[in-house]
Amino acid sequence: MKSYNFLITSRILIAVTLTVFTLSSCDRGTKSKTAKSSQNILELPLLKQLPADTLGFLAWNYDSPGFSDYVQTYQETFSNQKGSVIEQIQALATENPDLKPLADMTEWIFNEKFIETDLSKPQPLKNGVAFFELSDDGSALGAGAYFSSRDNFNLSTKLTALKKKLSEEGIETAPFKVNATELGEVTSYTISLKGKDTDEIKKLYVVANAHTAAITTAQELSEGAFQKAVSEDVAILKSPHFQKVKSQAHISGSEITLAFADVKEALTKIEKLLNVKNGDTKSFDPAQIPVNGVLFTGDMKDKSLWTSAYVTLKKDKGEIEPFTAPLKADAHYLPPTINEKSVLSLGFARNLLQIGKTALMMAPEVNSNPEVKEKLALVDQIDYLKLGVTQGDPGSLFPGIFLQLQSKDSSSLGQTLKGMLTQMIQSGQAPLTPWREKDISETKISYSLSPLGVGAYLASKDGNLYLTSSEASMGSLLSGTSKESLDSSFGDASEKTLREEKPLFVSHFNGAKMAELITMAQGNLAIFTGGKNPVDAEQIDQIKSMGNVLWTLAFQDDALIFHGIQRPTPKEASATS
């Protein structure tokens, strides 16, 4: 029997898992639109087979209604996944020879078409669910995964071939008799795995008929995939914590992936488990963790990939209450800076600024320093803070950097900021010229330049204070972000979500613009680098392929809401588009 380094092995398993997801996402090409099934992810038959003690699950459905958009949008991105994953695995095996058998096994899985690399063909494993459970007394921990295949992919036959391959690799397998009824012809066996630094043997139980398979840590869990459900009601789906977060997330059923963990219930059972092992009723206090449940979803909206997470918090937040209290106030929201010059922007609502101030004031060296406390007091005048990077002026060696502050008294705040900069100029801390004035976009600005061409541009408009390092940055900021520019970048759903949720934090990144910025900077610096670019063409292409990305964080009804929204850069689009 062979030993495996489970830490490194997990890297391979994660790579394969991600490949299953991404390739499956591209499995049907244009056939997706005519798929026979478009089942609601919460109504998948395998989901109804979850054990009664399930505390968390991850479900995926490659026949979901919005899946054809994902296929069409991301097909090019994952067109060579087999090669890239196999190359990664073989590279790991080269670093650690003990992993060579596992690398060969993974390549065998690809060759046996468990993962279909021809994107014009359906992916064999059409849906599934992974889960973990813990008994009421905390004594038994279990985990597993159930899979469902398409009509032309016989799981019993394939897993019989897998058993033979495992034996050839020196991994011990043994048949066992299943107790579940009405299974038909099945394959059932155990896989024995031994840790590298321990003699303890872990067993996995494999059961499969033609189109359903289970791989679990206990025999009764593997058989559970095939037994007739006692009730249509799935315990974890009826739990109050799932029902609450489901309503907040507006689950439609069209999601590609959906995962949930009942954190409060899991912590309660873990407490029992630890107390049983340690004989100490105070070894762990779940009340210290103020989380009830966590929900994750993955879906396509308006040709953009949405990954979202919802974390519901307890009413009593214990020691973190001073930090969460500011979240309850209405958040002031500014849309992300998206225009022809924007590369990156980070936006922070007053609520987060107040949390940051509270954390800093807890440090003795800050609380005892009058000068620092005076500067921190400026935070109270700010409703919203935004930092970012734009493309610089033509011919400049440097990108544009900007700071935007929204305040009820932006004029006074501007005078304070200008006074601080003036002191730096007069003391020689900043090599800048005296202040001058000019108009940009019909707005009067003050500016000061350095010998390198970059400087400080200061303006106040409509309750906003702007400070930038270049004239081009100031012009792009003054033009603002229109609803149309947000819609064209991410679709109408993003604008609507931002408007309704009023996020505390918003970040925007444009891969194509960043790629162009890096290319221009390397060209300008070629005389100093001798043409040796620190970022090669392949890396620039990878940055460009990230497309437009939006990250947001909101707080509503005692729940933290995270969104990641991505729209990839079209292949034909240039970096200057």
Image: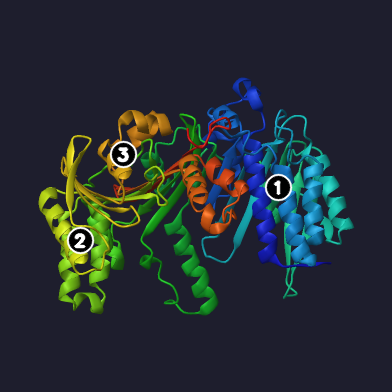
Could you classify mark 1 by the number of other residues whose Cα lies within 10 Å: few (under 14), some (14-19), or many (20 or more)? few
Element class at badge 1? helix
Question: What residue would you read off at disc 3?
Answer: 476
Q: CA distance from mark 3 to mark 1?
A: 39 Å
Q: CA distance from mark 2 to mark 3?
A: 22 Å
Residue 324 position in % (x across, y down): 27, 59
Position of 222 with respect to 62 (left or right) is right
Question: What residue would you read off at disc 1?
Answer: 84
| Residue 362 higher or lower than 542, as above or below | below
- As drawn, the residue found furthest toward the right would be 168
Task: Decide which of 431, 299 is in the foreground and name it.
Answer: 431
Residue occupying image coordinates x 18% and y 42%: 438
**Residue 37 visible in the picture:** yes
Q: Quadrant of the N terminus?
A: bottom right
Task: Decide which of 87, 563 is in the foreground and name it.
Answer: 87
Q: Quadrant of residue 491?
A: top left
Q: Are marks 2 and 3 in contact (CB under 8 Å)?
A: no
Could you classify mark 2 by the number of other residues whose Cα lies within 10 Å: few (under 14), some (14-19), or many (20 or more)? some
Q: Are marks 3 and 1 in contact (CB under 8 Å)?
A: no
Way the structure is coloured:
rainbow
User: In the rendered structure, which amino acid carries the disc numbered 3?
Assistant: Ser
| Residue 119 higher or lower than 354, as above or below | above
Mark 2 and mark 1 lie on one chain; the one further toward the N terminus is: 1
Q: Nearer the viewer, mark 3 or mark 1?
A: 3
Residue occupying image coordinates x 18% and y 77%: 369
Position of 478 with respect to 106 (left or right) is left
User: In the rendered structure, which amino acid carries the disc numbered 2?
Assistant: Leu
Element class at badge 2? helix
Residue occupying image coordinates x 73% and y 60%: 92
| Residue 19 higher or lower than 66, as above or below | below
**Residue 225 visible in the picture:** no
User: In the rendered structure, which amino acid carries the disc numbered 1?
Assistant: Ser
